[in-house]
Image: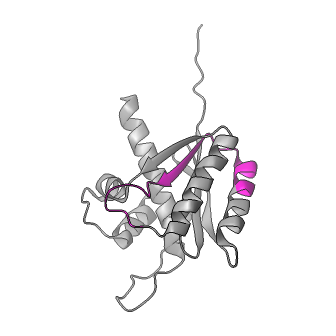
Amino acid sequence: MNQTMSKQVRILAIAPTARGFGYCVMEDEAILECGYKGVRGNKNGKSIFKIEKLMNQFLPDVVVLQDVYAEGCYRAPRIKALHRKIVGLAANHKCKVKLFSGNQLRDALLGDVKGTKHEMAELLARKYPVELAGKLPPKRRPWENEDGRMDMFDAVGLAAVFWMKRAKRAV
């Protein structure tokens, strides 16, 4: 009898922000861990240190990031520099890198490129209720700063879209 074993693919999705980064570790569409890491001081240096710890702990096969160079994406130069360092770190760990634009995320998750981050977060909380429902922040009002927990939902969204695109290729 000839059986082929498909290797499980473990991904680390990272969503860098001005305050730190959100992350999600998934294996075969199951969330192993997700969260938010805040940093102060040398933000890029400390972020890279924490991301490398995550990579050493979870040994991902693929690192998933938002494409900071996509049309319509406006990210600070510091975030773009951090993005380049994360891509380099992934190469050092022999991980593949997959990039998705914000429009690809909204289109894949919501079917509408004009959807909001909160709508994506609500959808993800319904899809992964055990892991995320209790972490969903209230809808932000225009005068409020974005809740730090949204960075984690951004990372989970990146991971979920990675699996959605992978499943379409397999069909």
Image x and y of residue 9, in percent: 58, 37
Residue at screen point 36% across, 59% down:
102
On the picture, is 17 further left or further right than 169?
A: right
Q: Is residue 36 above or below residue 27?
A: below
Can you tell which quarter of the image residue 143 is in? bottom left
Q: Residue at x 29, y 55 (%)?
A: 107
Quarter the N terminus occupies:
top right
| Residue 28, placed above or below residue 15 | above
Q: Is residue 102 left or right of residue 125?
A: left
**Residue 145 shows in the view:** yes
Q: Quadrant of the C terminus?
A: top left
User: Which residue is the extreme one toward the top?
Assistant: 1
Q: Quadrant of residue 62?
A: top right
Q: Is residue 61 above or below residue 99?
A: above
Q: Is 64 included in the stretch rendered in magenta?
A: yes
> Is residue 127 one of those drawn in magenta?
no
At 57% from the left and 26% from the top, the residue drawn is 6
The percent coordinates of residue 137 (x first, y second) are 47, 79
Q: Which residues are magenta?
A: 52-74
